[in-house]
Protein backbone atom coordinates (compact mmCIF):
# COMPACT_ATOMS: atom_id res chain seq x y z
CA UNK A 1 0.00 0.00 0.00
CA UNK A 2 1.38 3.40 -0.89
CA UNK A 3 3.92 2.26 -3.48
CA UNK A 4 2.61 0.49 -6.58
CA UNK A 5 6.13 -0.05 -7.98
CA UNK A 6 7.45 -2.60 -5.46
CA UNK A 7 8.40 -6.04 -6.75
CA UNK A 8 8.90 -9.17 -4.68
CA UNK A 9 12.49 -10.39 -4.74
CA UNK A 10 11.39 -13.93 -3.84
CA UNK A 11 10.42 -15.83 -6.98
CA UNK A 12 7.91 -18.65 -6.47
CA UNK A 13 7.02 -17.12 -3.09
CA UNK A 14 3.54 -18.66 -3.36
CA UNK A 15 5.18 -22.08 -3.81
CA UNK A 16 3.07 -22.78 -6.90
CA UNK A 17 6.10 -24.40 -8.57
CA UNK A 18 8.14 -27.26 -7.15
CA UNK A 19 11.18 -24.92 -7.01
CA UNK A 20 13.81 -23.66 -7.28
CA UNK A 21 13.60 -20.98 -6.24
CA UNK A 22 13.74 -21.30 -3.33
CA UNK A 23 16.63 -23.57 -2.32
CA UNK A 24 15.43 -26.27 0.07
CA UNK A 25 17.49 -27.31 3.07
CA UNK A 26 17.27 -30.70 4.82
CA UNK A 27 13.69 -31.65 5.61
CA UNK A 28 12.09 -28.96 3.40
CA UNK A 29 9.73 -29.88 0.54
CA UNK A 30 7.29 -28.02 -1.72
CA UNK A 31 3.97 -29.65 -2.53
CA UNK A 32 0.43 -28.50 -3.33
CA UNK A 33 1.42 -24.82 -3.21
CA UNK A 34 2.97 -24.95 0.27
CA UNK A 35 6.48 -25.38 1.66
CA UNK A 36 6.85 -27.79 4.56
CA UNK A 37 9.62 -28.76 6.97
CA UNK A 38 9.74 -32.11 8.75
CA UNK A 39 11.45 -32.60 12.10
CA UNK A 40 14.66 -33.80 10.46
CA UNK A 41 17.19 -31.11 11.28
CA UNK A 42 17.43 -27.39 11.76
CA UNK A 43 17.41 -26.16 8.17
CA UNK A 44 16.51 -23.20 5.97
CA UNK A 45 14.47 -22.51 2.91
CA UNK A 46 16.28 -19.70 1.05
CA UNK A 47 16.10 -17.42 -1.93
CA UNK A 48 19.76 -17.04 -2.88
CA UNK A 49 21.73 -14.83 -5.25
CA UNK A 50 19.81 -11.70 -4.28
CA UNK A 51 21.27 -8.23 -4.67
CA UNK A 52 20.68 -6.76 -1.21
CA UNK A 53 22.01 -3.35 -0.25
CA UNK A 54 23.58 -2.82 3.18
CA UNK A 55 21.53 -0.38 5.24
CA UNK A 56 18.32 -0.92 3.25
CA UNK A 57 15.22 -2.27 5.00
CA UNK A 58 13.61 -5.33 3.43
CA UNK A 59 9.99 -6.07 4.31
CA UNK A 60 8.51 -9.54 4.18
CA UNK A 61 5.53 -11.66 5.09
CA UNK A 62 4.79 -15.35 5.48
CA UNK A 63 1.74 -17.38 6.37
CA UNK A 64 2.46 -20.13 8.87
CA UNK A 65 -0.29 -22.68 8.28
CA UNK A 66 0.86 -25.08 10.97
CA UNK A 67 3.72 -25.43 13.42
CA UNK A 68 4.32 -28.13 16.00
CA UNK A 69 7.08 -30.00 17.79
CA UNK A 70 8.98 -29.53 21.03
CA UNK A 71 10.56 -26.07 20.93
CA UNK A 72 9.40 -25.56 17.33
CA UNK A 73 10.01 -22.15 15.81
CA UNK A 74 10.53 -20.45 12.48
CA UNK A 75 12.85 -17.47 12.03
CA UNK A 76 13.13 -15.07 9.07
CA UNK A 77 16.75 -14.29 8.14
CA UNK A 78 19.05 -12.51 5.74
CA UNK A 79 22.17 -14.60 5.16
CA UNK A 80 25.42 -14.52 3.23
CA UNK A 81 27.92 -12.65 5.35
CA UNK A 82 26.64 -11.76 8.81
CA UNK A 83 23.24 -13.30 9.59
CA UNK A 84 20.44 -10.82 10.31
CA UNK A 85 17.61 -12.64 12.09
CA UNK A 86 14.05 -11.68 12.96
CA UNK A 87 11.86 -13.05 15.73
CA UNK A 88 11.38 -16.79 16.28
CA UNK A 89 7.69 -17.45 15.60
CA UNK A 90 5.95 -20.29 17.41
CA UNK A 91 2.33 -19.73 16.33
CA UNK A 92 0.29 -19.93 13.13
CA UNK A 93 -1.05 -17.01 11.11
CA UNK A 94 0.15 -14.24 8.84
CA UNK A 95 3.48 -12.83 10.03
CA UNK A 96 5.00 -9.58 8.81
CA UNK A 97 8.35 -8.00 9.51
CA UNK A 98 11.41 -6.28 8.19
CA UNK A 99 15.17 -6.78 8.32
CA UNK A 100 17.97 -4.33 7.59
CA UNK A 101 20.64 -5.81 5.34
CA UNK A 102 24.32 -5.71 6.24
CA UNK A 103 27.31 -5.99 3.93
CA UNK A 104 27.50 -9.42 2.32
CA UNK A 105 23.83 -10.42 2.64
CA UNK A 106 22.78 -12.24 -0.53
CA UNK A 107 19.89 -14.45 0.59
CA UNK A 108 16.54 -14.31 2.38
CA UNK A 109 14.77 -17.22 3.95
CA UNK A 110 13.34 -18.98 6.96
CA UNK A 111 15.14 -21.24 9.44
CA UNK A 112 13.05 -24.00 10.99
CA UNK A 113 14.27 -25.35 14.32
CA UNK A 114 15.30 -29.02 14.60
CA UNK A 115 11.98 -30.30 15.95
CA UNK A 116 9.77 -28.03 13.86
CA UNK A 117 7.07 -29.56 11.73
CA UNK A 118 5.92 -26.47 9.90
CA UNK A 119 4.01 -25.51 6.76
CA UNK A 120 4.35 -22.05 5.17
CA UNK A 121 2.92 -20.18 2.20
CA UNK A 122 2.96 -16.74 0.54
CA UNK A 123 6.39 -15.32 1.37
CA UNK A 124 7.03 -12.09 -0.57
CA UNK A 125 10.03 -9.91 0.29
CA UNK A 126 10.80 -6.47 -1.12
CA UNK A 127 12.92 -3.40 -0.48
CA UNK A 128 11.10 -0.71 1.48
CA UNK A 129 10.79 2.60 -0.36
CA UNK A 130 9.93 6.06 1.00
CA UNK A 131 6.47 5.75 -0.59
CA UNK A 132 5.60 2.51 1.26
CA UNK A 133 2.91 2.77 3.90
CA UNK A 134 4.15 1.76 7.36
CA UNK A 135 3.93 -1.92 8.36
CA UNK A 136 0.98 -2.82 10.47
CA UNK A 137 -2.74 -3.31 10.66
CA UNK A 138 -4.78 -0.33 9.51
CA UNK A 139 -8.45 0.62 9.26
CA UNK A 140 -9.44 2.06 5.88
CA UNK A 141 -12.56 4.16 5.43
CA UNK A 142 -14.40 4.47 2.12
CA UNK A 143 -16.04 7.82 1.28
CA UNK A 144 -18.35 7.83 -1.72
CA UNK A 145 -17.92 10.84 -3.99
CA UNK A 146 -20.53 12.11 -6.44
CA UNK A 147 -19.81 13.46 -9.94
CA UNK A 148 -19.28 16.95 -8.49
CA UNK A 149 -16.60 15.68 -6.13
CA UNK A 150 -18.76 16.02 -3.00
CA UNK A 151 -18.05 13.30 -0.41
CA UNK A 152 -20.88 11.39 1.20
CA UNK A 153 -20.85 9.77 4.64
CA UNK A 154 -17.97 7.41 5.41
CA UNK A 155 -18.46 3.66 5.54
CA UNK A 156 -17.46 1.44 8.43
CA UNK A 157 -13.73 0.69 8.59
CA UNK A 158 -12.22 -1.94 6.34
CA UNK A 159 -9.35 -3.78 8.03
CA UNK A 160 -6.12 -3.88 6.05
CA UNK A 161 -2.71 -5.39 6.74
CA UNK A 162 0.10 -3.50 5.03
CA UNK A 163 3.06 -5.59 3.89
CA UNK A 164 3.19 -5.33 0.12
Image (cartoon, rainbow, N blue to C red):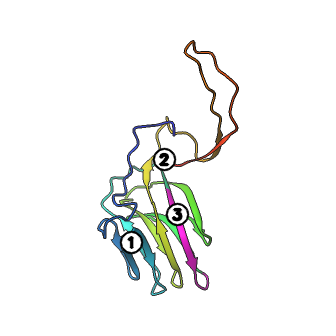
How far across and how far down the image is residue 16, in percent? Answer: 35, 64
Q: Is residue 156 magenta?
A: no
Q: Is residue 76 above or below residue 2?
A: below
Return the residue found at the far top.
Answer: 148
Tell me if 29 is positioned left or right of 131 in this view.
left
Q: Whole-Å distance between the Cαs marked 3 and 1?
A: 15 Å
Residue position marked by numbered label 1 in the rendering: 32
Identify which residue, 108 or 133, lies in the foreground.
133
Q: Residues within 10 Å of mark 1 (few under 14, many from 20)?
A: few
Which secondary structure lies at badge 2? loop
Task: Identify the residue at horizontal 61%, vertical 85% (top origin).
Answer: 70
Query: Which numbered disc, 3 or 1, marks the residue that appears first in the sequence?
Result: 1
Q: Which residue is mark 3?
A: 63
Identify the residue under disc 2. Answer: 164
Image quadrant in which you'd find residue 50: bottom left
Is residue 69 covered in magenta? yes
Marks 3 and 2 close (CB-CB < 8 Å)? no
Q: What's the distance in space between the residues labelled 1 and 2, CA to CA?
A: 24 Å
Q: Nearer the viewer, residue 136 or 98?
A: 136
Specify the segment rendered in magenta.
61-71
Q: Classify residue 90 as left or right of residue 60.
A: right
Going from N to C along the chain, the mark reached first, 1 or 2, is 1
Amino acid sequence: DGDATIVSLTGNSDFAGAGPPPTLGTGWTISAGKAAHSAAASASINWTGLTLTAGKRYRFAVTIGSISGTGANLTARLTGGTVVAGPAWTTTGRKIGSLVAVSGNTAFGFLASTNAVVQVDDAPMFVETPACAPDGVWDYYAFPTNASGVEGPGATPILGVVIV
